Amino acid sequence: MGLIVQKYGGTSVGSLERIQRVAGKIAQRYREGNRIAVVVSAMSGETDRLINLAKNLSPKPDSREMDVLVSTGEQVSVSLLAMALKDLGVPARSLLGHQICIYTDKSHTKARIHQIETGKIQQVLESGEVAVVAGFQGITEEKDITTLGRGGSDTSAVALAAVLKADVCEIYTDVDGVYTCDPNICSKARRLDRISYDEMLEMASLGAKVLQTRSVEFGKKYNVPILVKSTFTDEGGTLTTAEDEDMEKEVVSGITYDRNEARITLLGVQDRPGIAATVFSALADENINVDMIIQNSSADGKFADLSFTVTKTDSERALEIVRGKASILGARDVVGDTAIAKLSIVGVGMRSHAGVAARMFESLSQVGINIIMISTSEIKVSCVIDEKFLELGVRVLHDAFKLDEPGNSLEKN
Ligand code: ASP
Ligand code: MG
């Protein structure tokens, strides 16, 4: 018996049959005596469909109205799921973001949760009803509807679990957990039973699309255990939880990649104070996020080459902005390259093991993969490589770090 928050993603509620199946799963847990709050995404494809409607109507849809529009997807799925539960004899109540006061800031289409008032939802749970909560949506102090960014229902669920002090936040999706790497690329990929918040944060932000990054930040901050499971089987699952000593034994826990990056290089800019500031302030003013940055000065110290990466989506705009500044910076040329990908290894064990990056570089070089850029953090090493070698790179690193066996270590090779 406990208090459980469950979240069902778009594919899990993608058809009426699936909604009925989900209702069956919830009913079972309910009958075991648990209090349950369920967070639901829009039926699969629905959010995309709504976004396309807006884009076909307006070249630059107003973001406040966009939120009113896209939040309707979740209104459909919560009502249907609550109906299905009631048909199974389980008392249930659908609840929208504004009804349970999920307060956010005013950044439409990518709002951040500030506060959730628990009064209403507690009342629903205590009365013995299953609370079926619309994910992805919130409300500002001014009562405008907001949404939390794509994949935001994960964040709704973990935030709700945090404020309700739930025993666990179960995220039901179409995969049965988090893998050492993308199983579609590497047949030896192994499901992880457990992973730390920090590793999951790196994996999520590096492109493993299982959980929205923000949801893991919430989990870490409020120590909410997050269990990722498949809606369609009872087996498996990966628990994201606080780090412990056992986790450090694994040098590398996972390999992840991101194809959505592009590189921009300014060639031969003057080597003087203020150059980087000019470039990156101009990008920041346009809300363009920069990921990796590399600068090389020539031996005589007169010129430098400056390279950085942005998302492919932002790359055209970033190129335009930087080209606009090229003459002030004295750049000889500005070039863009979208045929790149970022390949990364992640593991808390890196904190206590030397030679991890060296092994990565060595393994890539052995198959002739050239490294274009490198960046590191305490628990991650990322390399930008030619996109066409990405899949090979993933497989080579999976072998090099023996990720198909639990308890891998550098010594074993
Ligand atoms: N329906 C929203 C989306 O497609 C939120 C979510 O599914 O988490 O991004
Ligand atoms: Mg998702």
Image (cartoon, rainbow, N blue to C red):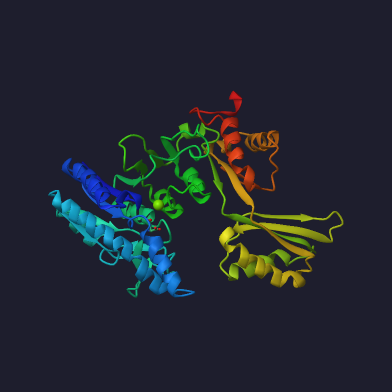
Image coordinates of residue 337 in percent, x first then y, are 67, 56
Q: Is residue 198 toward the left or the right of residue 337 in the image?
A: left
**What residue is rendered at 58% in x and 63% in y?**
314
- State whether residue 62 appears in this view: no
**Rendered view: 283 above or below 391:** below
On screen, residue 380 versus residue 37, left or right, reads right
Residue at point 34%, 75% (across, down): 142
Position in image of residue 184 (x %, y %):
49, 40
The picture quadrant where one finds residue 391 is top right
For the C terminus, give its image quadrant.
Answer: top right
Residue closest to the eye, 212 or 231? 231
Q: Left or right? Give the position of 124 relative to 355.
A: left
Question: What is the number of callouts on the image?
Answer: 0
Quick one: 305 or 113, which is closer to the camera?
305
The answer to whether residue 158 is above or below residue 119 is above
Write down the quadrant of residue 73 in the picture.
Answer: bottom left
Q: Nearer the viewer, residue 355 or 242?
A: 355
Q: Residue placed farthest to the right in the image?
A: 300
At x 24%, y 61%, the residue is: 95
The image position of residue 19, as x and y in percent, is 25, 50
Q: Position of residue 378 (x, y in %)?
A: 58, 44
- Where residue 141 sits, quadrant-wise, is bottom left
Residue at the extreme top of the image, as rendered = 412
Q: Determine the residue located farthest toward the front in the rendered image.
A: 56
**Horizontal relation, residue 287 to residue 308: left or right:** left
Farthest residue toward the left?
Answer: 89
Q: Quadrant of the N terminus?
A: top left
Tell me the residue at 30%/64% (across/down). Answer: 97
Residue 54 visible in the shown view? yes
